[in-house]
Amino acid sequence: MSLATTVRSASDLGLVTLVGIAMVVITVVLAVLSPVLSPYDPIASNADAALMGSSWAHWLGTDAYGRDVLSRTLYGGRFALVVSVLATTICVALGALIGALAAFYEGWIDGAITRVLDAVLAVPAVLWLLLIVSVFGSGTWVIVVAIAAVYTPAVARVTRGAARPVMRSAYVVAAQSRGEMSLPIIVREVFPNILDTILVEYAMRACWVILLVSTLSFLGFGVNPPNPDWGLMIQENRTALVVAPMGTLSPIIALAVLVVGLNLAADGLGKYLGVDRAMRGVA
Amino acid sequence: MSQPGASLIDSRFGEQVAVVQDLTISYRAGDRNVVVAQDVSFTLNEGETVGLVGESGSGKSTVARTLLGHLRPGSKIDNGTVTVLGRDMFTLGERELRDMRGRQVAIVPQNAGQSLTPSMRVGGQIQESLKLHGLRHDPARIAEFADLVRLPTPEEIIQRYPHELSGGQQQRIAIAMAIATDPQVMVLDEPTTALDVITQGAVLALIQELRERLNMSILIVSHDLGVVSAIADNVIVLNKGVATERGAARDVLTAPRAAYTKRLLAAAPRLHPAPGEPEPEPIPFDDHAPTLLRCVGVDIRYPRAISLAVRNFQIDIREGETVAIVGESGSGKSTVAHAIAGLLGVEHGEAVITAADHRSQDLRQPVRKRPPVVRRSVQMIFQNADLALNPRRSIGDSVARPLRLFKRTRSRVETKQRVGTLLTEVGLTEQFARRVPGQLSGGQRQRIGIARALAAEPRLLIADEITTALDVSVQADVLRLLDELQERHGLSCLFISHDLAVVKSVAHRIVVMKEGYVVESGPAAAILDDPRHPYTRALLDSVVEPGVERLPSVDIEQRVRRVDASAAMVDVASGHLVRADVGADL
């Protein structure tokens, strides 16, 4: 894609979407660059400087152990972001595959898959997570796999819904009449036509995952103290909300910026992709 | 434009009920201003029927809908006025407009199946329009309307839901809804496009009858010159939003003056030659060509269906021959096409093709179980080319797929060259390979559909209603192309269509189907000139052609009896087979 077309499609996205994308990008860049940007070691405690308000030394003050809130906030998104990217990628990939298969085979295979998905969906995600984490411990990979497993049914449902009308389209029938095998039909004919839905689902799902990770940490099942994490920070500092409000507010604001940004981006992306891209000649 | 529709004022009719004057409508698309209609003027008199004809995109529907004060969102009137019963439709307030709509001006939409509410009984829907305008709406009154549009058992039928009615019955309900409030103007937007020929004939006859009984003025919009010719007194030919010709239907559709109208008429397929033109020679065919496809006693059933969709089907297609299957929707013609293409299995009978390897191969298996050489030998072209091409794949990619799948080319470069050749062969250029279907016109897409079928190097092409979605002029080009390619590659073709006039221009032999049975088959000339089965006769009688003012009789649907399951096929002349049903002339 040339520079000109990139710029043109960026302006097509609309201001709100661009703001959303900017919010996400800023949060991610700050988290990635936190080792460089942080003024202090996020886990170095300092009993002399506990629960201080904003100052030139500590812009956002310190927490009960005298740790720098700014540094902890900068570092605090890393875990959630890593888990989010990994878990979302896994659950969207897996869910899309299962959903497409269900839509493709129809009949009893579809029925069986859908009923299992419904059963999993009937139990709240947080409950599943707590169950898995209590059994297998709270290692990063356990959390990634657990979240992926918990959200896969939802993605599969969405994909199945999007793929069903495509399955009946004449171009799929055309492929069948050529004698194409199942996999080429799914990959060549179906996926390109539900990719927009899957992309939007990815962005939405990432935002749910971040909230879920923070919830886990808040409940004490995610990141282990003293490591910095937004959910954990909110949990640790909320008792001192009146004394040093920034300790609680800054992770909340950071979390809100990321989640709202992801939402706006997903929404705008959905609108952008929803308009038939094929009509504009984007293959 | 000087006087609005001055030439149309006709002493046969009463006062002016609708006047459209210098109407210009446009909408904005990006930075461009697209003009949909330009300086269109016409008058609709009391008891008159005016036809608006033109191809898709001519603005005919847009103009017609202004009589109801309707504009598509984003469109605007740049100039001109629309006056109905002395009131300027585009200066009326919401309330006044609502009072006019339905009460004074009613519309019958194109596809009644889609415009009726699926969750409501049809009687209730007729009742709604009566109630809205404060008219009598008791069940007896509603049944009267159902009777008026000649629906059988009116009291019973108004209790049904739309999906329980046939397409023709749905269209009759839509007409009943429109006439219920006794409007003075009725707008018919392609009222018969979605219907079978026989149903179309009956609906047109009904419209004609109602017009006389209720003294309505009718504006009929259609792309079908035959339909307009059959019921309109005056016509206006629209080309890209401009009225290119106007006048009495008889004159315009038999002796057109504008070049555009001439072209449209020349492209319209005909069963009978236009006045003054010689009867075209029957398409010659060598009777001794070897048989390519043979089906004997074929039964086809949809998966898990209780009854058979097609029974005892029989066909022979010789090399290079085009055999057409005609029949109404539900007759099983598409089912046969799908079974031969392998999308359905054959339950009983014999189906054999001489495949591309010159060996006799079984066609009873669905496509998954057929060897590649058999799959390649039978290729299908689909009805709706817009839907048969993956919108997210480039044209080049779509055409290249069969080349790779059937190993017709060995390298990337060769594939690319072959795609270029194929595109040129169907009258496009190599540059099209980089485009996506959304950037192509309907006719171009159907050419791509043909190129994709050709890529497999088949022996038999199955053309399933391939011109139904196309304008007449494009249709003529596509049919000519198909004929040319068949000749060049020595291909046979199974041509599925509901349009006898189209079939006449392409087929060597014709098979007529009804309710899953073959009722008559034989050489095209024999079927068209000497039909022996009552159904074939009804089909031929129902065709309305440009310049013909005769309408099929209102009861034509009743004349078509059901097929007798035990009747045998009788050979009445060499190769002309007729099913021995009641009324068949053996």
Image (cartoon, grey):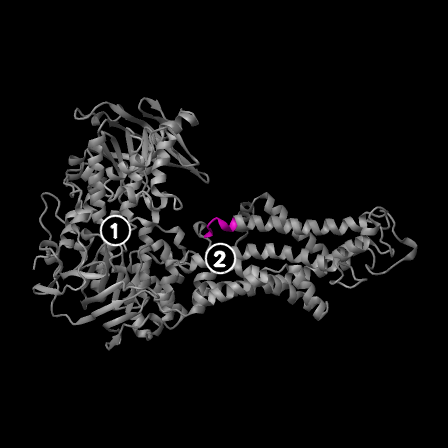
- At 77% from the left and 50% from the top, the residue drawn is A250
Q: Please provide percent x and percent y for residue B199.
A: 23, 47
The residue segment tinted magenta is A272-277
Q: Which residue is mark 1?
A: B475
Give the number of marks: 2
> What's the residue type where badge 1 is placed?
Gln
- At 17% from the left and 24% from the top, the residue drawn is B11
Look at discs 2 and 1 and give the one toward the viewer. 2
Q: Residue B303 occupies which quadrant of the picture?
A: bottom left
* Helix, strand or loop under label 1: helix
Badge 2 and badge 1 both on one subunit: no
B339 up-or-down from A249: above or below: below
Q: Residue B215 occupies which quadrant of the picture?
A: top left
> What's the residue type where badge 2 is placed?
Gly
Q: Main secondary structure of the magenta part?
A: helix
- Relative placement, left or right, of B569 versus A92 is left
Q: Which residue is mark 2?
A: A161
| Disc 2: host chain | A
Characterize the local packing of mark 1: few (<14), some (14-19) or many (20 or more) Cα atoms within 10 angstroms. Answer: many
- At 43% from the left and 50% from the top, the residue drawn is A279
Quadrant position of the N terminus of chain B in the picture = top left
Q: Which residue is nearer to you in this view: A238 or B379?
A: A238
Which disc, if any, is residue B533? none
In the rendered image, residue B135 lying in the magenta stretch gets the answer no
- At 17% from the left and 51% from the top, the residue drawn is B560
